[in-house]
Image (cartoon, rainbow, N blue to C red):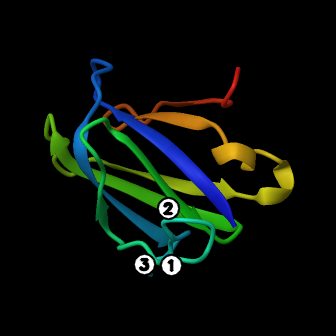
């Protein structure tokens, strides 16, 4: 079980407030089981992120497709990031892991480790 953190930005680098996030089992249209904490409290899927554009979820180790839509500014159809890997064995999840900044219009992403 790993926590995945995302900061959603638009093509100008502005945070996207209240985006809709849907997490799928990779390569399918099957909604994944996600959690609000380390496997205890189920999280709605899809869910609406906060006004900061920083969203997170916990899920079992594996690959997921993460779809981001809506928000302010409106991303419209948005973007889907395929094959997002969650893997506790990589040691990235301690203390909440890194934060991946996702540009929902250009599909560019960059991950920053927490505490660096």
The secondary element bearing badge 3 is classed as loop
Q: Picture coordinates of residue 6 (x, y %)?
A: 47, 42
Height in image: 65 above or below 53?
below
Say which residue label 1 marks: 33
Say which residue label 3 marks: 31
Tag 1–tag 2 contact (CB < 8 Å): no
In the foreground, 24 or 18: 18
Residue at screen point 47% across, 52% down: 56
- The quadrant of the rendering that contains the N terminus is bottom right
Tag 3–tag 2 contact (CB < 8 Å): no
Q: Picture coordinates of residue 21 (x, y %)?
A: 34, 58
Disc ID at residue 106: none
Nearest-to-viewer mark from 3 and 1: 1
Earlier residue among tags 1 and 2: 1
Earlier residue among tags 3 and 2: 3
Query: Could you tell whether 16 is left or right of 96 in the image?
Result: left
Say which residue label 2 marks: 65
Disc 1 and disc 2: Cα gap in Å? 12 Å
């Amino acid at each position: 079980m790993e926590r995945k953190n995302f900061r959603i930005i638009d093509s100008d680098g502005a945070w996207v407030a209240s985006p809709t996030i849907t997490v799928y089992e990779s390569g399918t249209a099957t909604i994944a089981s996600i959690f609000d904490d380390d496997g205890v409290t189920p999280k709605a899927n899809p869910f609406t992120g906060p006004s900061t554009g920083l969203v997170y979820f916990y899920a079992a180790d594996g690959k997921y497709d993460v779809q981001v839509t809506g928000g302010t500014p409106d991303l419209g159809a948005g973007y889907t990031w395929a094959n997002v890997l969650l893997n506790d064995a990589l040691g990235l999840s301690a203390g909440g892991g890194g934060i991946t900044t996702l540009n929902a219009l250009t599909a560019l992403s960059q991950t920053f480790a927490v505490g660096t």
